[in-house]
Amino acid sequence: MVHDNDSFIREVNEELRSEQISGVWRRFRYFIIGGAALIVVGTAAYRGYEYWHSHNASIYGDQFLAALNLAKDKPDEALAALKTLEADGSGAYPVLARMRAATLLAQKGDVAAAVAAFNDVSKDKAVPEVMRDVAKLRAAFLLIDTGTYDQVSAEVEVMAVPGNALRNSAREALGLAAYKAGDMAKAKQWFQDIAGDATAPRNVANRAQIMLDTIAASGKAP
């Protein structure tokens, strides 16, 4: 194939050098027409893909926004719309729909179903890792009120380490869970980890300091 291509190019160059333009067209017109057709088809296909991608992204974005608006007054209809988007959408919208649906379940009071939905996302290897971690955090914060410290720990303690982008949110969940469980020493340690992290978001650091002051006032931690 490479040899044939080289021969073709060499023959075309020879014809051009001899200025036999009519001979070039006569001998190579099918190659030239075919090559031009491929360029046109390829360009059209690329532009078509761009349009399809942009058009679909717009459609799914509109569907997602519509579901968010429904969630304000009609949560059941919103859940149905999000389920449809999860099944039929593309790009990031299916996982966004799953996350929002889980949040809606929590708002409706079905915390167990919400935690299960977030856990499904966190275990789905097709979902980007950062979204899986966010799903774990959402489940952990729900479990602070409805579960045990060990359940919260199972969700997020692996993230509460230096270098993890969500470490301070994970530490906050663990500190609150420990505080709720009455383990003031453990709660104090988690909140101190936040307070001692210069990169902690200000609102998280402020809440950690409030909790440290509360624990100190209680006299229940060394």
Image (cartoon, rainbow, N blue to C red):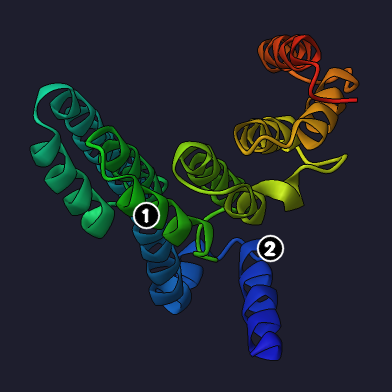
Q: Secondary structure at mark 1?
A: helix
* Residue at the image position 14 percent from the left and 44 percent from the top: 81
> Is 207 above or below relative to 2?
above
* Residue at the image position 75 percent from the left and 36 percent from the top: 167
Q: Which mark is residue 201?
A: none
Q: Report which quarter residue 178 is drawn in.
A: top right
Q: Report which quarter residue 181 is drawn in.
A: top right
Question: Residue 38: percent from the left, percent from the top?
Answer: 40, 65
Q: Which mark is residue 117?
A: 1
Distance (Cα) linking label 1 and label 2: 71 Å
Question: Residue 192: percent from the left, percent from the top?
Answer: 86, 24
Quadrant for the N terminus in the image? bottom right
Question: Residue 144: percent from the left, percent from the top?
Answer: 53, 38
Horizontal placement of 61 versus 151: left or right? left
* Mark nearer the N terminus (1 vs 2): 2
* Residue at the image position 86 percent from the left and 28 percent from the top: 193
Specify the amino acid type for callout 1: Ala
Quadrant for the C terminus in the image? top right
Eye-nearest disc, 1 or 2? 1
Horizontal placement of 121 versus 84: left or right? right
Q: Report which quarter residue 163 is drawn in.
A: top right
* Residue at the image position 36 percent from the left and 46 percent from the top: 47
Horizontal placement of 100 versus 163: left or right? left
Q: Secondary structure at mark 2?
A: helix
Q: Is residue 43 visible?
A: no
User: Mark 2 = which residue?
Assistant: 17
> Is 13 above or below relative to 46?
below
Q: Who is closer to the viewer here, 183 or 126?
A: 183
Specify the amino acid type for callout 2: Arg
> Is 92 above or below relative to 219?
below
Q: Residues within 10 Å of mark 1 (few under 14, many from 20)?
A: many
Question: Residue 67: percent from the left, percent from the top?
Answer: 19, 33
